[in-house]
Image (cartoon, grey):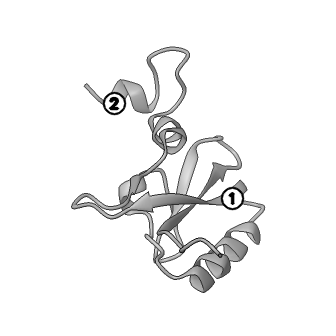
């Protein structure tokens, strides 16, 4: 039996900086998961992923990541996505330096 579709966001890495980015509903790329489009329809998710993969001049490694709705926008459901959104872990810089 096929698994039930769970909400997703399209995520990738910005080509030039390597930062984690998320596709927004208005076809932008944001570095903030809270601005990502939360997709609840499987066909739309596949379409949005194909659109992302068609932007090799902007992003690389696009894929669908599980997410859940919250008051502050989509939130990750897997620790990998939580880890990716906080940035590198080798020392305190970038996104980690912005949060106290």
Quarter of the image that includes the N terminus: bottom right
Q: Which is nearer the N-term, disc 2 or disc 1?
A: 1
Tell which residue pokes out farthest to the left in this image: 71
Q: Position of residue 54 (x, y in %)?
A: 76, 72
- Is residue 54 positioned above or below 96 on the image? below
Q: Where is mark 1, residue-wise?
A: 62
Badge 1: how crowded within 10 Å, few (<14), some, or many (20+)?
Answer: many
| Residue found at x 48% / y 74% | 39
- Is residue 61 positioned above or below 100 on the image? below
Q: Position of residue 58 (x, y in %)?
A: 69, 59
- Is residue 82 positioned above or below 37 on the image? above
SS for dot 1: strand
- Is residue 24 positioned above or below 61 on the image? below
Residue nearest the viewer, comparing 7 with 22: 7
Horizontal relation, residue 40 to residue 56: left or right: left
| Residue found at x 27% / y 60% | 70
Q: Where is mark 2, residue-wise?
A: 98
Q: On the image, which quarter does residue 71 sit in?
A: bottom left
Horizontal relation, residue 98 to residue 84: left or right: left
Residue nearest the viewer, comparing 62 with 56: 62
Task: Specify the label residue 32 is tagged with.
Answer: none
Quarter of the image that includes the C terminus: top left
Q: Position of residue 20 (x, y in %)?
A: 57, 46
Badge 2: how crowded within 10 Å, few (<14), some, or many (20+)?
Answer: few
Of tags 2 and 1, the one toward the viewer is 1
Tell which residue pokes out farthest to the front in this image: 1
SS for dot 2: helix
C-alpha distance separating marks 2 and 1: 25 Å
| Residue found at x 59% / y 76% | 45
Q: On the image, which quarter does residue 48 sit in?
A: bottom right
Would you say the residues marked 2 and 1 are in contact, meaning their CB atoms lie under 8 Å apart?
A: no
């Amino acid at each position: 039996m096929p698994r039930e579709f769970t909400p997703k966001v399209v995520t990738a890495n910005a080509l030039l900086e390597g930062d984690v980015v998320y596709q927004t509903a208005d076809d932008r790329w944001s570095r903030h998961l809270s601005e990502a489009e939360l997709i609840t329809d499987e066909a739309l998710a596949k379409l949005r992923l194909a659109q992302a993969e068609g932007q090799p001049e902007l992003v690389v490694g696009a894929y669908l990541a599980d997410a859940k709705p919250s008051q502050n926008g989509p939130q990750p459901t897997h620790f990998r996505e939580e880890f990716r959104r906080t940035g590198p872990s080798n020392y305190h810089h970038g996104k980690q330096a912005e949060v106290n």
